[in-house]
Image (cartoon, rainbow, N blue to C red):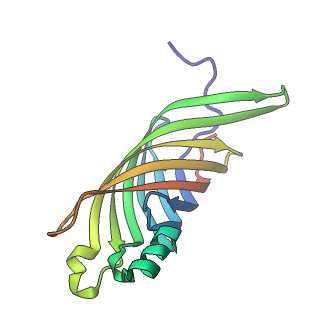
Amino acid sequence: MTAVQERAYRMMHEIDVSVGVLPLDPFSKGLYAQGSYTAHFTDFFAWQVARGGYAYTVKTSLRSQLERDFGVLPPAFEEIQFFVGSDALFKPFYGKLSVVDKWDLHFEVFFIVGVTVFKFNVPDVALGRAFRPGVNLGLGGRLFLSKVLSLRLDVTDNVVIPLGAGQNISNVMAMTLSLGINIGATE
């Protein structure tokens, strides 16, 4: 079975400028800025070749209470400083939605599978512990604004793999909102 209409928007080379949040850590919340490049090989498969972000951490009230009431020192809390990664995007869903018979919205939904390397704020003597790899799975969506611009929302869960003694497997959830710039579209 084939679609009734062809896609109105096709992606080729995408540059993204993004902002996001790392919401899972109970002691701090990470806010980050990210940039990425994605090559779209077909309508159904793309490779986010490179993405990198820098995080700014905001203390939660729980962390402030632990520091104030129990004398827990700031180095006891690991925070993400920056990260780099690469992902495969599987894009099986594309749709068009009519809004009050005046506007057509074009969108796609995709699955994300990838790898990320995180840099944590551990002392320099433990540099081997500072960089940790992770494997991520996620879901994303894109709203096409024009042939060149689109808005993209990604939600991924990164399973961070421990490399040293005393570390545990941890999860880093990332929620990213991006402005995508499509270069070289065929239509």
Q: Residue furthest front?
A: 69
Residue 171 in view here: yes
Residue drawn at x 70%, y 28% as measured from the top left: 97
Q: Is residue 88 above or below residue 24?
A: above
* Above/below status of 166 relative to 124: above
In the picture as drawn, the residue positioned furthest to the top comes out as 1
User: Based on the displayed image, in which of its 4 quarters is residue 116 positioned?
Assistant: bottom left
Residue 142 lies left or right of residue 62; in this view the side is right
Q: Residue 159: image x %, image y %? A: 31, 53
Question: Which quarter of the picture shows residue 77?
Answer: bottom left
In the rendered image, which quarter contains the C terminus? top right
* Residue under the point 84% across and 27% down: 100
Q: Residue at x 59, y 55 (%)?
A: 177
Instruction: Determine whether, in the image, residue 6 is placed left or right of residue 70.
Output: right
The residue closer to the viewer here, 35 or 70, is 70
Rendered position, 131 above or below 134 = below
Q: Is residue 60 visible?
A: no
* Residue 69: % across, % down: 44, 79
Q: Position of residue 3 (x, y in %)?
A: 57, 19
Expressed as whole percent of the image width and height from the top left, the position of residue 60 reads 51, 69
At horizontal 48% and vertical 71% (from top left) the residue drawn is 55
Q: How many marks?
A: 0
